[in-house]
C-alpha cells in the first residue's frame, strides 16, 4: 500500500495505481448526495409539484375573468351543436369521422366543451368554468413536463427549471386564455404522458414492457384525438431512444411501426379535413417554393428568440406583403441563419453534446410541421404553435442550471444562476398575467392586435363586427352612434388594406342593412359574392335574402335563402330567418317548423324562440308560446321586446298583473313597440 503526505502533513492511504479524492472534493460529493436524497423523499416531490401548480395558478388565474371572443370561439362553442348534446348519440356524433369542426378532427377536445356546456351553457356568469378547465389542463401539462424531465435526466433541478419556464411562458397564454386554444392543452396532456410512458417502456424489464408500450399507444391516440399535430410523436420517440442510448436493433424499429401507421392515418385525415374547410393556403399572397423556405426560416428564428424575449406578442401574425411581386430580400437572410444553426447542431452531434442535440431536435421536430411549409390559414406565426416545441429549449436551460449542482459544478455560481432564473421566471409570469388580460374579450383582443400589427385587415374586420353587434344590442342613442361610427370606420379600413377580403364587405353590409341603407348593403353583399369565398358567400346571400324580404320582393328573397342554405345546410341564422320569411308570406305552420330546425341546430339562439312564440300566440297556442318566451328570456334577459310580447301572451291568458309587469319591464329596458304591435 503506497502512502502520500498531503499539504497539511496528514498521511492518506491510496490503493496502488489509483488516485484518492481530495478531502474537499469528497465533502462536496457527500453534500451533493445528501441534496439529491432530499429530492427523493416523496413529500419533497409533492411540495415541488404543489409549488409549480400554485405559482402557475397565481400568475394565470386572471384569465378566469375572460369572456368569449369572436375568433373561432363561436365555431367551437357558441354555435357548435355537437357540444350541446351529451347523450350517447350525441357523444357518437362528436367522435364521428364525418364531423370535423372548423377543419379539424379533435373529438376529445370537443368532448371537454360538451361536458362544460352541460353545466355552464352560454351564461356569461359561468364562462369561468371553461377558462378554469383550460388553466387546470395547462397546470397538469406543466406537472407532466416536470415529471418527464425528472425521469429522463434524473435531475430534479433541471426538471423544476424546465417546468417553471413551461408553466409561465407568455407564448403559452394563447393556448390557455383563448377557449378555442383548448386543443393545445388537451393534446399536450396526453402527449407528455405518452413520452413519460415511453421512457418507462425503454427502461422496463421484459415483463412490463408490453404494458408500458400499450400505455404509449393509447395515450398517443388520445393525443391525436385532441389535436392532429400529435402525429409527430413517433419522431420524438426516436429522440428519447437517442437520449437513452438505445442500440439501433430490430426492437427499436419494430416498436415504431404501429405509431407511424397511426400517425400516417391521422395525418391524411387532417389534410383531408383542412382541404375541405378551405384552410390550406394563405389568405392573400401566394408564395413559391423558395419563398416558403425563407418564410419558414423566418418563423423558426422568430420562435427561437421569442422563447428568450417574448415581446410584441400578437394573436395573429400576417404574412409579409410582397414588394413588386417578390418577397423582401431580408427574409432570405433567415435561411443563412438557419443553415448556420443547423451546422452548429451537427457539430454538437459529432462532439456528442447529447443535451444540446436532444433539446434542439425536440424543438425542431415539434415545430417543423408548423412552419407553414404547407400553408394553413393566413398567419405565418402563432404563439400556440410553441406549446410543446418550447419544451426542448426549456430542457436545455434546465440542464444548464443543474450542471452547477453536479459534483464538478460551482454551487456558489449555481445559487446565483438559480436566483437569476427565479427572477426571470417571475418576469415571464408577469408578462403572462398581462397577456391573459389582452384575451379578456373581443374588443381587448383586436385592439391589441391593431396596436401590434396595424396592417392586419382581419383585426379591423373582427373589431368592426364586434362594434356592429354592440350597436345592435344598445338602446342608448349615443352608444349606438358611437358603435356605428366605430364599426363603419374599422370595416372600411379593413377593405382598404385588402380589397379582395370578403368578410369586411359582408360585415359592412350587415351594418348598413341594420340601419335601412339597403342599396349600399346590397352593393357590399354582391361584392363579397364576386370574390368567390365559399365559406362567406352564404352569409352574403342571407343578407340579401333579408333585404329582399323586407322589400316584399318575395321571389328574390326565396332564391337567396335557398342559395345560402344550399352551400351551408347547417346555418341556424339562415334557417331562423327563412322561418321569418315563411311567416311573412302567410305560411305560419311551415315557419314554426323552420324555427324548430333553427333551434335544433343552435338551441342558444333567442330569436327563433321569440319568433316561434309570436307565431304560436297568433295560433292561440298560448302555453307553448309562453314556454318559448321564457326560454328566449333565459337566453337574452336584457331584451325588452321579449318582455313586451310575453306580456301580451299573459294578457291573452287573462293574467293582467303579470302582463303589466312585463310591459313595464320592457319600457325600463328601452323597448318602444311598433305601431302595429298588439296593445294591452
Image (spheres, rainbow, N blue to C red):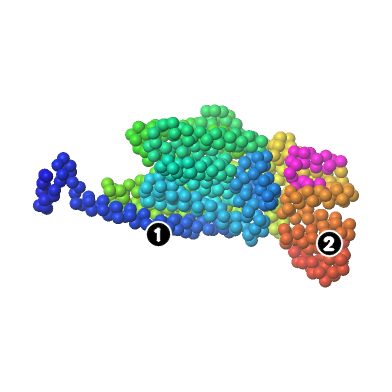
* Residue, far top: 289
Q: Main secondary structure of the magenta part?
A: helix
Q: Earlier in the sequence, mark 2 or mark 1?
A: 1
Magenta-highlighted residues:
555-579
Q: Secondary structure at mark 2?
A: helix
Residue in view at x 58 percent, y 35 percent:
265
Q: Is residue 473 above or below residue 375?
A: below
> Can you give x and y, in whole percent of width and height, for residue 584 in the image?
87, 50
Q: Along the horizontal axis of the image, is 495 left or right of 416?
A: right
Query: What residue does disc 1 label?
Result: 43
**Is residue 674 covered in magenta?**
no
> Can you give x and y, in whole percent of width and height, for residue 75 in the image?
66, 47
> Can you give x and y, in whole percent of width and height, for residue 214 in the image?
51, 42
Residue in view at x 86 percent, y 66 percent:
653
Q: Along the horizontal axis of the image, is 137 left or right of 673?
A: left
Residue 550 vs residue 593, the one in the foreground: 593
If the image is split into quadrants, where does the N terminus sit? top left
The answer to whether residue 107 is seen in the rendering is yes
Residue in view at x 37 percent, y 57 percent:
41
Mark 1: few, some, or many residues within 10 Å (few <14, many ≥20)?
Answer: few
Q: Which mark is residue 623?
A: 2
**Is residue 577 covered in magenta?**
yes
Residue 206 vs residue 25, the one in the foreground: 206
Q: Along the horizontal axis of the image, is 77 left or right of 1?
A: right
> Can you give x and y, in whole percent of width and height, for residue 425 in the image?
43, 53
The answer to whether residue 71 is seen in the rendering is no
If the image is split into quadrants, where does the C terminus sit? bottom right
Q: Is residue 295 above or below residue 49?
A: above
Amino acid at each position: 500500500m503506497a502512502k502520500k503526505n498531503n499539504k497539511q502533513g496528514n498521511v492518506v492511504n491510496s490503493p496502488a495505481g489509483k488516485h484518492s479524492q481530495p478531502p474537499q472534493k469528497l465533502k462536496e460529493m457527500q453534500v451533493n448526495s445528501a441534496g439529491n436524497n432530499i429530492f427523493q423523499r416523496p413529500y419533497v416531490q409533492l411540495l415541488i409539484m404543489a409549488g409549480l401548480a400554485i405559482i402557475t395558478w397565481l400568475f394565470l388565474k386572471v384569465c378566469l375573468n375572460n369572456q368569449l371572443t369572436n375568433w373561432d370561439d363561436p365555431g367551437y362553442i357558441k354555435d357548435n351543436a355537437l357540444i350541446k348534446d351529451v347523450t350517447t348519440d350525441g357523444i357518437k356524433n362528436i367522435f364521428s369521422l364525418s364531423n370535423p369542426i372548423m377543419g379539424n378532427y379533435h373529438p376529445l377536445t370537443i368532448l371537454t366543451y360538451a361536458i362544460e356546456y352541460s353545466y355552464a351553457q352560454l351564461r356569461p356568469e359561468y364562462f369561468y368554468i371553461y377558462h378554469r378547465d383550460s388553466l387546470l389542463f395547462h397546470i397538469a401539462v406543466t406537472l407532466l413536463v416536470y415529471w418527464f424531465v425528472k425521469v429522463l435526466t434524473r435531475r430534479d433541478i433541471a426538471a423544476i427549471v424546465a417546468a417553471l419556464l413551461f408553466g409561465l411562458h407568455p407564448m403559452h397564454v394563447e393556448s390557455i386564455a383563448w377557449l378555442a386554444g383548448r386543443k393545445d392543452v388537451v393534446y399536450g396532456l396526453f402527449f407528455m404522458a405518452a413520452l413519460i410512458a415511453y421512457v418507462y417502456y425503454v427502461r422496463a424489464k421484459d415483463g412490463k414492457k408490453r404494458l408500458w408500450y400499450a400505455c404509449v399507444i393509447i395515450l398517443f391516440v388520445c393525443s391525436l384525438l385532441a389535436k392532429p399535430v400529435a402525429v409527430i410523436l413517433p419522431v420524438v420517440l426516436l429522440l428519447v431512444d437517442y437520449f437513452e442510448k438505445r442500440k439501433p436493433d430490430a426492437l427499436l424499429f419494430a416498436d415504431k411501426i404501429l405509431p407511424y401507421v397511426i400517425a400516417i392515418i391521422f395525418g391524411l385525415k387532417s389534410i383531408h379535413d383542412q382541404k375541405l374547410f378551405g384552410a390550406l393556403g394563405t389568405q392573400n399572397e401566394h408564395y413559391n417554393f423558395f419563398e416558403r423556405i425563407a418564410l419558414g426560416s423566418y418563423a423558426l428564428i422568430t420562435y427561437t428568440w421569442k422563447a428568450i424575449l417574448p415581446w410584441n406578442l400578437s394573436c395573429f401574425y400576417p404574412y409579409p406583403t410582397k414588394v413588386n411581386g417578390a418577397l423582401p430580400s431580408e427574409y432570405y437572410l433567415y435561411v443563412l441563419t438557419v443553415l448556420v444553426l443547423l451546422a452548429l447542431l451537427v457539430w454538437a452531434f459529432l462532439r456528442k453534446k447529447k443535451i444540446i442535440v436532444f433539446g434542439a431536435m425536440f424543438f425542431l421536430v415539434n415545430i417543423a410541421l408548423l412552419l407553414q411549409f404547407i400553408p394553413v390559414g393566413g398567419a405565418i406565426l402563432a404563439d400556440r404553435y410553441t406549446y410543446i416545441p418550447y419544451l426542448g429549449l426549456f430542457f436545455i436551460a434546465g440542464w444548464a442550471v443543474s450542471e452547477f449542482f453536479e459534483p464538478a459544478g460551482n454551487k456558489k455560481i449555481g445559487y446565483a444562476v438559480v436566483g437569476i432564473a427565479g427572477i426571470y421566471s417571475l418576469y415571464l409570469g408577469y408578462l403572462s398575467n398581462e397577456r391573459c388580460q389582452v384575451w379578456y374579450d373581443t374588443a381587448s383582443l383586436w385592439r391589441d392586435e391593431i396596436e401590434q400589427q396595424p396592417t392586419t385587415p382581419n383585426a379591423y374586420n373582427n373589431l368592426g363586427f364586434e362594434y356592429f353587434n354592440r350597436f345592435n344590442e344598445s338602446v342608448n342613442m349615443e352608444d349606438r352612434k358611437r358603435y356605428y361610427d366605430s364599426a363603419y370606420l374599422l370595416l372600411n379600413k379593413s377593405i382598404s388594406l385588402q380589397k379582395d377580403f370578403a368578410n369586411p364587405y359582408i360585415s359592412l353590409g350587415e351594418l348598413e342593412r341594420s340601419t335601412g341603407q339597403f342599396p349600399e348593403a346590397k352593393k357590399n353583399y354582391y361584392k363579397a359574392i364576386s370574390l368567390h369565398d365559399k365559406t362567406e358567400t352564404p352569409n352574403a346571400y342571407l343578407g340579401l335574402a333579408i333585404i329582399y324580404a323586407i322589400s316584399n320582393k318575395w321571389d328574390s328573397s326565396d332564391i337567396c335563402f335557398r342559395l345560402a342554405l344550399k352551400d351551408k345546410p347547417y346555418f341556424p341564422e339562415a334557417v331562423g330567418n327563412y322561418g321569418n320569411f315563411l311567416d311573412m308570406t302567410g305560411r305560419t305552420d311551415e315557419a314554426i317548423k323552420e324555427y324548430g330546425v333553427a333551434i335544433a341546430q343552435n338551441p342558444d339562439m333567442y330569436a327563433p324562440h321569440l319568433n316561434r312564440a309570436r307565431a304560436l300566440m297568433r295560433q292561440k297556442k298560448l302555453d307553448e308560446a309562453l314556454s318559448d318566451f321564457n326560454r328566449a328570456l333565459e337566453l337574452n334577459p336584457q331584451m325588452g321586446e321579449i318582455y313586451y310580447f310575453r306580456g301580451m301572451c299573459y294578457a291573452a291568458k287573462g293574467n293582467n298583473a303579470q302582463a303589466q309587469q312585463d310591459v313595464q319591464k320592457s319600457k325600463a329596458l328601452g323597448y318602444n313597440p311598433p305601431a302595429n304591435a298588439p296593445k294591452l
